[in-house]
Image (cartoon, rainbow, N blue to C red):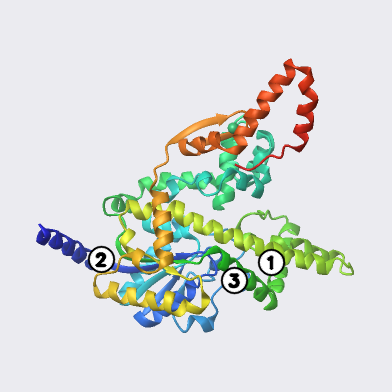
Amino acid sequence: MRFLLRRGYSTLRLFKQSMEPLVVIFGSTGTGKSDLAVELATKFNGEVINADAMQMYEGLPIITNKITTEEQRGIPHHLLGNVPISETPWTILQFRDAAAKLISDIRERRKLPILVGGSTYYIDGLLFDDRIIKDQSADTILDRDELNTRFPILTESGEVMLKKLREVDPVMAERWHPNDARKIRNSLEIYYTTGRRASEIYAEQRSRKESKWAQASESSHSPWNVLMFWLYARPELLNERLDNRVDKMVASGLLDETAAVYDWYQSQIAAGETVERDRGIVQSIGFWQFEPYLRAVKETPESTELAKLREAGISDTKAGTRRYAKYQVRWVTTKTLVSIQEERLLDTLFLLDSTDINTWHGEVAGKGVDLTRKFLAGEQLPQPVDLSETAKEVLTAKVERSNRKDTPCNKRCDLCDSTFLTEELWQKHIKGQKHSKAVRWAKRRALARTDPRRRALVAVEGQVADPEPV
Ligand SMILES: [Zn+2]
């Protein structure tokens, strides 16, 4: 029995060995992904393919956090700075086709392709094909409160939201009536959380069904033998590091770049071009945050408020960067990990602990190099949870969480004016504080209608009752 099992295993390994190797590096901003890619490329004769939407834009090295020529150490980098700033970011399909072509070109040169980037939806789209686009619903990435805070328009009426949708996704807007508030909201959510139009996503789904690529990949999933690195840093320390990085960016000329984008943006407007506020290069963190300052510099250069506006821009950029890092981790845990499990690739996903910058060389570069060497030699790889304490803790918790199959539903709590799309979220809501408070409040109100003596009491309590988030 044991013999058979072992033979089964080695057959699988032989099969995998016959496929082309591909190293993939993802994780949040500020964890040292680009550095690891260069380190591996140097050691194993590799070439790097960038999978970060903003770094695909040409120029603007600071605001897009691009690796410098010096840091590239002579390693060829592809899809870096190849998109003019006047264009919208590449779609998942565009990226997938270009990256697949590059991977095979690099293999033809007998070199190792290394895919690296923070736009994990690109990586998901390449490795797992349509899985990612099937479920672009924003609810799994951000909770409702967070969405509403970030995009207040989502709390507006159907009519107001539809007006916005007409601007950003006219094709989708055509489909809805102002009364379809929930559907309009959903289309807008997709747009805000993915930076892509829902209508494009649906069109891609249709074309993918027809494409040969999809038919081929349905039977054999990823055509590559993949080794994945998830660079992870504990949030407390990462946030501190991200704050420092923003200060460094400002010191090395972030504002000159932002001003250049601002001038470009203004010139487009002046020329009558429509530039969307939430798409393309202007999405870079550090652009809108400094807009009030840049405007003041142009319009009221004598203003004594300038220094204050600049400081506000810096602190908003820091907050935006931290939020983005959190969002990237949530993407990995709610989307990428699910696909990795479905493809049974968990044993090739290694979390490298990038929390402490002082141990980066050992924990990230050292372990990464060692694993890649074993992987390329076809040696047995260690268990991912055994790599570090952080790996054990995070992988165990997140895999368990993403493993939990949520039961879809569509339940509405009129009392709290909220809709819930999974049974689990619904249960959490009706057992939660916010809901109990709303129930108590409703009871008192009902009582007050019948008992005038209670009315005054209710009015006083009503003033101090603070709505708590779920
Ligand atoms: Zn409720």
Dot 3 beta carbon under 8 Å from ligand 1: no
| Quadrant assignment, res 333 | bottom left
Where 421 sits versus 361, above or below?
Answer: above
CA separation, marks 2 and 3? 39 Å
Closer to the chain start, of discs 2 and 1, is 2
Which residue shows up at 38% across the image and 75% down it? 367
- Residue 98 position within the rendered picture, expressed as x and y whole percent measured from the top left: 42, 63
Where 25 sits versus 40, above or below?
Answer: above
**Disc sitting over residue 261 in the figure:** 1
CA separation, marks 3 and 1? 26 Å
Amino acid type at image mark 3: Arg
Q: Would you call the spot at circle 3 few (<14 residues within 10 Å), some (14-19), or many (20 or more)?
A: some
Q: Would you call the spot at circle 1 few (<14 residues within 10 Å), some (14-19), or many (20 or more)?
A: some
Query: Pointer 2: what residue?
Result: 19
Q: Would you call the spot at circle 2 few (<14 residues within 10 Å), some (14-19), or many (20 or more)?
A: some
**Disc sitting over residue 241 in the figure:** 3
Where 172 sits versus 361, above or below?
Answer: above
| Quadrant assignment, res 165 | top right
Which structural element holds mark 2?
loop
Question: Cβ–Cβ below 8 Å for labels 3 and 1?
Answer: no
On screen, residue 315 versus residue 214, left or right, reads right
- Residue 90 position within the rendered picture, expressed as x and y whole percent measured from the top left: 51, 59
Q: Quadrant of the N terminus?
A: bottom left
Closer to the chain start, of discs 3 and 1, is 3
Residue closest to the eye, 255 or 211: 255
Q: Quadrant of the C terminus?
A: top right
Which residue shows up at 54% across the image and 76% down it? 67
* Number of marks in picture: 3
